[in-house]
Amino acid sequence: MRVARLESETDFEGWRGHARALLCEGVPPEDVTWQVGAAQDTLFDILDAPAPPRDLAYRPKVSKQFLADARLALCHRDEGRFGLLYRLIHRMQDTPDLLSNAVDDDVIRLGALVKSVSRDRHKMRAFVRFRAVKGEPDTFVSWFEPEHRIVEENAPFFLRRFANMTWSILTPERSAHYDRKELRFGPGARQADAPDGDALEDLWRTYYGAIFNPARLKVKAMGAEMPKKYWKNLPEAELIAPLIASARKLEAGMVEAAPTPPKRLAEYAFAEPDLPPGDALAALRRDAAGCALCDHACHATQTVFGEGPLDAPLMIVGEQPGDREDIAGRPFIGPAGDLFDAVLAETGLSRDALYITNAVKHFRFTPKGKKRIHQSPKIGHIDHCRWWLKAERKLVKPKVTLAMGATAIRSLAGRAIPVSEARETGFDCFDGRAGLATIHPAAILRQSDPVEAAAMREALIADLRRAKDISA
């Protein structure tokens, strides 16, 4: 009989070392007794430390999944867990796929241990409530009573989540302490060692009561997810019983209340604009400067409105302003605008003879350091801005409109059409006028293949020439 001694109830590395040595020596599971703590007087041989393997060429076979399950299973309070794990790993040497046998008794038992510990670990993460320590800024203590020995296994989660504060988690058997520099473990404590409460708990109870939804209350499901044994340590627990008791009354009030109409786009987003008298374009530009209906309008520097003569036979519609356009307040003056001006010159078109605008009037971006990275507008942004585009088209009345890019096509056609398809067939704009499509200059600038970029540039020039001929 061999006796393998471990330093603690959760000594995974010690168990692993003993198991490796015992496997190399060929010791069967029934000949091993597992002992935790100091060695006791015994007539049997004691493995105070893993013995070196007798066969240096032999390497025990074990899967990563088994090691992960074994680490969790050792946190269980089942006294036979050490023997179970060694028996499994011993059997796996001849049956490597043993864990896939769902009807094997040892595999079933291991699964039950892992499931129980995993659930307890999840409950600890959900129901630990830190309380501020009076007189010690940014120092918090929590009391928790886990079902299994999971403090050391679970502590790294709290370390990652609360790395900027000093905290302790006290349990009856083991405690974890973090001082913003080092994570340490110590002996168990008493509930009296933790604070009784703090000022934030009143705020938390107010929040919990406010988010309680009586229409979705399921008492059995709630009890399964928040077992009553945890209630005594939860500040919000005192609200649960009265909230459940009043749930039917609250639900009846919700049913009797008038239904809330669904949130829709502003009605004028689909309406025909009523143009102001006088200098209508200047008035529209002033009104658009105060537009804040899109969720990204408040982040943009300003509205970028269209510009050009009101009698222009050709309207160019881009997608949305870029960084440079957002700062200057004019369309197509950034890198894409430089390319656009170059191809206009090659086609014999004058920018001063065109009306140039964008489907969306605000720059949508994501901050990244000092840069603002372009983001494509959403369908809601396109639909909101269509009112301004309608107003522009009602003033300009272009003979032909050239949409550059998918967003412009979506705005003018009212539906998504692939750029390649729209280039070949054209489309009808929402006001019945003819629409043509082409590649957006920015897409050419993003193309990394020089040959492909050159081909796209030639396609843009050909589309501009076609638009010029039709609008003449």
Image (tube, rainbow, N blue to C red):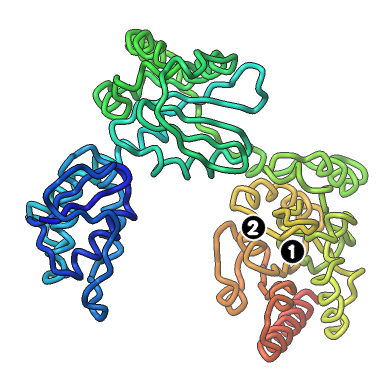
Query: Where's residue 79, x and y in %?
Result: 18, 40
Mark 2 and mark 1: Cα distance apart in space:
9 Å
From what the image shows, is residue 133 above or below residue 440?
Answer: above
From what the image shows, is residue 381 above or below residue 207?
Answer: below
Residue 107 in view (yes/no)? no
Residue 158 in view (yes/no)? yes
In the displayed structure, does residue 275 sit left or right of residue 381? right
Q: Which quarter of the image is occupied by the N terminus?
A: bottom left
**Residue drawn 31% across and 30% down?**
225
Query: Where's residue 271, x and y in %?
Result: 66, 42
Q: Are marks 2 and 1 in contact (CB under 8 Å)?
A: yes
Rate crowding at label 2 as few (under 14), some (14 to 19) or many (20 or more) other CA atoms within 10 Å: many
Quarter of image, res 175 = top left
Q: Given the image, on which type of amino acid does mark 1 rest? A: Val
**Tag 1 residue:** 317
**Tag 2 residue:** 411
**Residue drawn 63% across and 57% down?**
430
Query: Where's residue 401, x and y in %?
Result: 73, 67
Quarter of image, res 107 = bottom left
